[in-house]
Amino acid sequence: MQINLISDTVTKPSEGMLQAMMNAQVGDDVFKADPTVNRLEERVAGLFGMDRALFFPSGTMANQCAIKAHTQPGDQLVCDKYAHVYNYEGGGVAFNSGVTCSLVDGHRGMITAEQVKAAMNPYDFYHSPKSALVCLENTTNKGGGACWDVEEMKQIRGVCDENGLGFHLDGARLWNALIAKDESPRLYGELFDTISVCFSKGLGCPVGSVLVGKDALIEKAFRIRKVLGGGMRQSGYLAAACLYALENNVTRLEEDHTKAKEIAKVLDGLDFVSNVEPVETNIIIFNLDQTVSDEVFLEALKQKGVSIIGMGQGKLRMVTHMDYTTDMHLHLMEILKKFDIKKAS
């Protein structure tokens, strides 16, 4: 049995999703003539109560277009040191937008309104980059799938309003947060200027992210997407998968969360595991005892048919997903409970 917990991006479309894709009505989306893409964009914009939405081939492109729409070269964005837009988007903030990052030392990828204030540059101090945008991430990837407190986000929104800053949410796993916290998408639409949401992670689609936002910003993003090569033609086949996922795969995220918590409990009981971060959603981050090599542990798991990932700085990560079945889960739990680190070493 092969078990892949490297990410929730490893899933394959289900039979129902494939059928929806094959039956999709399509057109040329570059000319906004694909009815299925248009329907997806209207649906997601409506969910968040936002003006418009735009379909993208990737979450990275959606984030990068949002950042460029909010900023000018030489500007600065404020984000946590763990932020995906800083760590995992290939330096696109600098390459695409000519923007620098003011990194905040938050807690598990989450920062406070007071920290945002402290990280900003004074507007009239022209020797420093102009602070123009605050980017948050929910759930936090490198922070272990942690969910933001809404009240803190409201406080940060207030700081942005007081200082004329844009407010963007990297919501790649926002669906997980909505389920874990029993929150409404409209709550986020009221807080943020732009939000990216991903369909190829927890929702099981092969491709696709959507950027929602205020009309003027999405209009800018539409042009930027073209410049970056993100205009697609008969992309309704992909949009159909996203529509199917909205109907069938959102509420089931709770199953992934439950399995992740059960894995964390087993890991916490192993004497060679030094720390397991709190689990709220589908990401488990843990550290091994200093006497145990991460590489040895990863290879030993691989030999048993289990693939996970190292994130650097001693962090190991597992991510549950819809293709991680109950049989796989029970098998993994037995592997972990019986794992002999001395033999592995």
Image (cartoon, grey):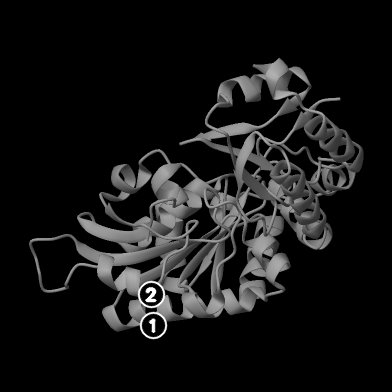
Q: Looking at the picture, which amino acid does disc 2 mark?
A: Ala
Left or right? Give the position of 161 relative to 275.
Answer: left
- Where's the N terminus, which quadrant? top right
- Residue sitting at x 57%, y 45%: 57
Could you say which disc has been placed on residue 91 in the image?
none
Q: What is the residue that sits farthest to the right in this orientation? A: 327
- Where's the C terminus, which quadrant? top right
Q: Nearer the viewer, residue 200 or 138?
A: 138
Residue indicated by mark 2: 113
Question: In the picture shown, does residue 344 fall above or below 44?
Answer: above
Image spot of residue 245 (x, y percent): 77, 55
Camera sees residue 225: no
- Residue sitting at x 77%, y 44%: 266
Could you say which disc has been placed on residue 158 in the image?
1
Q: Nearer the viewer, residue 112 or 248?
A: 112
Image spot of residue 319 (x, y percent): 68, 43
Q: 10 Å neighbourhood of mark 2: few (<14), some, or many (≥20)?
A: some
Cβ–Cβ below 8 Å for labels 1 and 2? yes
- Residue sitting at x 22%, y 54%: 73
Q: Looking at the picture, which amino acid does disc 1 mark?
A: Gly
Q: Secondary structure at mark 2?
A: helix
- Residue sitting at x 55%, y 68%: 148
